[in-house]
């Protein structure tokens, strides 16, 4: 059943689109040349300052790493909120995990659905591909300063590896990486590590988010690699956790 | 020129989806579409001042502006998070009310309270 | 330790607390888990006070701590600025957040996840207050937003899911427009930090012209959604009414004001910003009156309070906008800005208090309808409250919001009116004051007379509730009594460089006469509203049609109108 479309509704939609178009036109069709200040700085000094060849990584995990921290937090909150709202009937925030009174029916519904749709092909292929995808994920994560990639991208690939393992893995428990509890631990530990890494500069007198590894005499790029690894772990564990929860295997 | 026009059109389609369609799942699609339209616009315009990828290998000069790309990386992840959360809320609304139509959900909620 | 690091402790300590709370859930169970969660809350909500006190001498001298995070080059790095304004906004945030978290130990929501999300929200508040970078502001607002969507939904009511969804859709859409605004600013100036933007714009003919104006109005529009000024307030009443009580008090008290004060930094970037402030101020004055009329018509106790939040934020925005228009370096501007902040701070205290007291009361009576609940004071007594703390704290909050001396609402509203004297906004705010009085007489009726039915299952009032309420009530009274020193403290911290003028006189025959008129007027309006005709009119207002796309119509019209306004004046 659908609601009736009234004249007022159409008028409202029309009004919105027209006014927004009026605003967009000057913004999209401006002839002001694109500024080159930031580009010139990055081209001339970016590599020396950060040690990374990939300038996007240099900005993302060097110059503007505080934004990345915020982004990681958005992801953390979104993952825990989404799990709270979907997988547990929403009462995680209200009552906490492991509460026996939560809604069980949704789980069983989902688990049986997953079992029905499984085929041997799916199990074999995903089971074999899983480890390969994991390795590729770690490659993307650790080589983010040299080539396109980085913590977030690598983390998402790792998460899909975890999902593959969960789909293809048999019940004999050959890996614990697909257990929700393990992933939750990994996620919270890597979040703690990220905060501590940001604070490490404070302890050694370099300031908040200062490059501690460079002060200790290691190459500048070390800090970016470290952050890439931590963020990758965190994203992989977080998104993996969310997917596992959506598969109905959170316990 | 044509790409700006297409992007503006994409943005308007997304906005129309948010405002003019009652189905909440499609509203979320609309949100994703306008977010992506802005992301593409930012990166596209930022690449007009150069012609090489911003990875400083030997012999690379005149790179594109790397700042928009780094910013949009953040914006994309935030957009994905918002979408995930919105879909979760839509799922709960559907389970409570049995419909994706925003007006009917509104009506049911107001009948209860 | 460098001074810059001390500043970031305000952001990182709550985050550290959140990380501890999350780990407690992943690694431990039972009592250990709870203790570690409380440790996280202690780290996130109590330790920042040490930092705040340590920073106070520095900001009192009018200095600001500025710099670039991580010591990178200014053309790409993120700069920050911690000054008196940021200190005050942090004061606001940590006071209310601490009281609200304490309250949540009673009726909930409980659990490490709630604590973690709550702490992350607090940390985002601190970060928003001191960022001096446009894109970083975007990220901070998104963190704050996503935490609040989840906290609203955590009350597990169907209406709360719908409220959270509406808020998410309108606010996320507005944030995309904010991003478009950043695009406009970046492509004209090539910078994201505020100083870089000022330098870039001053080198352009006409400060960038149309593109700057439109970008600015997109940014202002997106922040105005968060601040919930008319006509962009539509998402607020439902979400604040249906969130858990502790969350409501933080949302109403802190979350809608922090973006406003962060926005004032953005508006000062462009000369045309003062006109944006002017228009916002007009909208604020109208908001104050219209929202109070709607509030008077409400039957749900918490929704009534939520509309009052809209109305009171109208007061703040009216003074804030007028201050930006006349310039904060003038005497009138500095009084207005200080008044705006004081009202924001005091409103956070008394509205937080009101949400908590009403929450305790309605939970105890299992009834939220203002027209049906009676004799709540007795019900509370039956529930085991020997000293009627909840009733007293409600009365304190109600007297404060209706601007009765010596409570703090009186001090801030008098300061505001002093700054706005002889303008049409003043009469709007005056009328809104009468409406506020009337609707709190209406709300206070739930406590008096006999209960219509015995409470069959009296729920004992948790001690955490009483402690949190008493704490806020003492603050309301204390800041009211010491209103003079508080005013001087705030003016010193703002450090506008305005000429030193006399502070507004709080207790004169005229202000006391005004209070008297307010009380009589409020009673008269209340009596009028209780008649049959008044009742019917209120019913029409209460049941006016509200739909989802109305939010977007308001947003598009608002943004376009603001761009037009700026183009016309700028």
Image (tube, coloured by chain):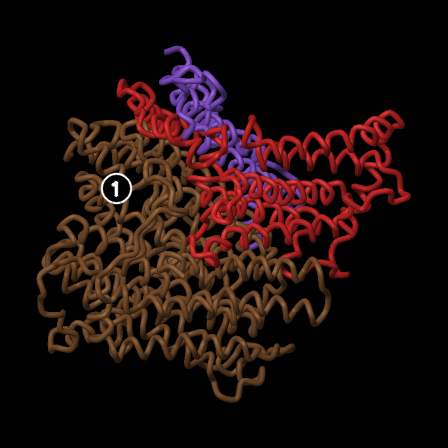
Label 1: which residue? C195
Residue C431 placement, left or right of C252: left
Please tell me how crowded label 1 is: few (under 14), some (14-19), or many (20+) other residues with Cα within 10 Å. Answer: some
Q: Residue at x 31, y 30 (%)?
A: C190
**Chain that is coloured brown in the picture:** C
Q: What residue sits 73% from the left and 34% below the top? A: A161
Q: Position of residue C553 (x, y in %)?
A: 38, 35
Residue C421, image x, y percentages: 12, 60
In the picture, the quarter occupied by the N terminus of chain C is: bottom left
Q: Is residue C490 above or below residue C286?
A: below
Front-lying residue, B77 or C47: C47
Callout 1 secondary element: helix
Task: Where is residue B109? Give x, y as percent.
Answer: 56, 49
Colour of chain B in the image:
purple
Tell me the colour chain A is drawn in.
red
Q: Looking at this view, name the residue that lies furthest to the bottom.
A: C386
Chain letter for mark 1: C
Query: Does residue C541 appear left or right of residue A163 in this picture?
Result: left
Task: Give the quarter of the image for residue A148.
Answer: top right
């Amino acid at each position: 059943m659908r609601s009736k479309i009234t004249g007022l509704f159409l008028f409202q939609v029309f009004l919105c689109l027209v006014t927004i178009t009026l605003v967009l036109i000057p913004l999209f069709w401006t002839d002001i040349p694109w500024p080159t200040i930031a580009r010139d700085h990055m081209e001339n000094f970016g590599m020396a300052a950060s040690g990374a060849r990939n300038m996007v990584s240099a900005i993302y995990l060097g110059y503007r790493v505080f934004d990345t921290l915020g982004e990681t937090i958005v992801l953390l909150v979104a993952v825990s909120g989404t799990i709270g709202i979907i997988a547990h009937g929403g009462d995680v925030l209200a009552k906490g995990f492991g509460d026996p009174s939560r809604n069980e029916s949704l789980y069983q519904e989902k688990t049986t659905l997953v079992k029905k749709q499984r085929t041997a092909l799916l199990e074999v292929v995903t089971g074999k591909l899983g480890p390969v995808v994991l390795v590729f994920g770690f490659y993307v994560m650790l080589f983010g300063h040299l080539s396109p990639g980085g913590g977030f991208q690598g983390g998402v690939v790792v998460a899909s590896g975890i999902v593959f393992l969960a789909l293809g893995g048999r019940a004999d428990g050959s890996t614990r990486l697909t257990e929700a509890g393990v992933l939750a631990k990994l996620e919270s530990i890597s979040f703690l590590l990220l905060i501590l890494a940001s604070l490490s500069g404070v302890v050694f007198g370099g300031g908040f988010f200062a490059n501690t590894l460079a002060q200790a005499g290691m190459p500048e790029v070390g800090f970016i690699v470290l952050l890439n690894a931590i963020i990758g772990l965190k994203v992989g564990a977080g998104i993996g956790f969310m997917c596992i929860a959506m598969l109905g295997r959170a316990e | 020129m044509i790409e700006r026009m297409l992007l503006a059109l994409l943005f308007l389609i997304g906005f129309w989806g948010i405002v003019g369609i009652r189905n909440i799942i499609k509203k979320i699609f609309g949100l994703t579409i306008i977010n992506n339209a802005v992301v593409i616009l930012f990166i596209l315009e930022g690449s007009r001042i150069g012609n090489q990828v911003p990875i400083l290998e030997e012999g690379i000069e005149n790179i594109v502006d790397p700042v928009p790309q780094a910013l949009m990386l953040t914006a994309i992840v935030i957009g994905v998070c918002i979408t995930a959360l919105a879909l979760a809320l839509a799922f709960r609304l559907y389970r409570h009310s049995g419909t994706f139509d925003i007006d009917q959900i509104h009506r049911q909620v107001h009948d209860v309270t | 330790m460098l001074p810059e690091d001390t500043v970031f402790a305000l952001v990182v300590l709550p985050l550290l607390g959140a990380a501890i709370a999350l780990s407690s859930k992943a690694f431990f169970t039972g009592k250990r888990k709870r203790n570690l969660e409380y440790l996280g809350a202690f780290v996130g909500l109590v330790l920042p006070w040490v930092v705040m006190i340590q920073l106070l001498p520095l900001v009192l001298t009018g200095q600001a701590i500025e710099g670039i995070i991580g010591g990178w080059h200014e053309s790409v790095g993120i700069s920050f600025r911690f000054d008196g304004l940021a200190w005050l906004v942090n004061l606001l945030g940590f006071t209310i957040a601490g009281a609200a978290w304490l309250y949540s130990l009673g009726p909930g929501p409980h659990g490490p996840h709630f604590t973690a999300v709550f702490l992350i929200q607090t940390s985002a508040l601190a970060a928003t207050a001191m960022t001096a970078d446009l894109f970083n502001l975007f990220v901070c607002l998104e963190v704050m937003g996503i935490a609040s969507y989840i906290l609203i939904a955590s009350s597990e009511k169907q209406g709360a899911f719908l409220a959270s969804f509406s808020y998410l859709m309108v606010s996320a859409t507005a944030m995309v427009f904010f991003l478009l605004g950043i695009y406009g600013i970046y492509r004209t100036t090539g910078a994201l930090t505020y100083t870089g933007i000022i330098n870039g714009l001053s080198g352009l003919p006409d400060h960038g012209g149309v593109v700057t104006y439109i970008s600015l109005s997109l940014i202002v529009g997106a922040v105005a959604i968060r601040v919930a000024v008319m006509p962009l307030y539509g998402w607020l009443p439902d979400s604040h009414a249906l969130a858990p009580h502790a969350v409501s008090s933080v949302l109403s008290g802190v979350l809608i004001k922090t973006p406003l004060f962060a926005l004032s930094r953005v508006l000062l970037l462009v000369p045309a910003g003062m006109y944006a402030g002017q228009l916002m101020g007009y909208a604020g004055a109208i908001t104050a009156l219209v929202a109070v009329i709607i509030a008077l018509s409400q039957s749900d106790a918490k929704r009534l309070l939520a509309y009052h939040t809209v109305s009171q934020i109208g007061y703040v925005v009216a003074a804030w906008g007028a201050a930006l228009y006349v310039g904060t370096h003038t005497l009138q501007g500095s009084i207005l800005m200080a008044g705006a902040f004081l009202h924001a701070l005091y409103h956070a205290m008394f509205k937080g208090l009101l949400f908590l007291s009403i929450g305790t009361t309605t939970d105890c009576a299992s009834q939220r309808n203002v027209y049906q609940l009676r004799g709540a004071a007795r019900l509370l007594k039956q529930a085991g409250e020997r000293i009627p703390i909840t009733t007293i704290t409600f009365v304190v909050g109600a007297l404060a919001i209706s601007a009765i001396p010596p409570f703090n609402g009186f001090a801030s509203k008098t300061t505001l009116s002093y700054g706005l004297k002889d303008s049409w906004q003043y009469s709007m705010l005056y009328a809104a004051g009468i409406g506020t009085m009337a609707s709190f007489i209406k709300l206070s009726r739930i406590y008096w007379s006999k209960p219509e039915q015995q409470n069959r299952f009296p729920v004992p009032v948790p001690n955490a509730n009483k402690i949190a309420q008493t704490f806020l009530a003492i603050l309301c009274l204390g800041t009211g009594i010491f209103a003079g020193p508080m005013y001087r403290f705030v003016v010193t911290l703002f450090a506008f460089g305005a000429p030193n003028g006399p502070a507004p006189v709080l207790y004169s025959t005229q202000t006391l006469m005004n209070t008297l008129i307010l009380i009589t007027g409020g009673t008269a309006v209340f009596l009028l509203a209780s008649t049959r005709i008044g009742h019917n009119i209120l019913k029409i207002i209460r049941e006016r049609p509200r739909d989802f796309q109305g939010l977007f119509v308001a947003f598009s019209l608002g943004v376009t109108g603001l761009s037009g306004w700026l183009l016309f004046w700028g």
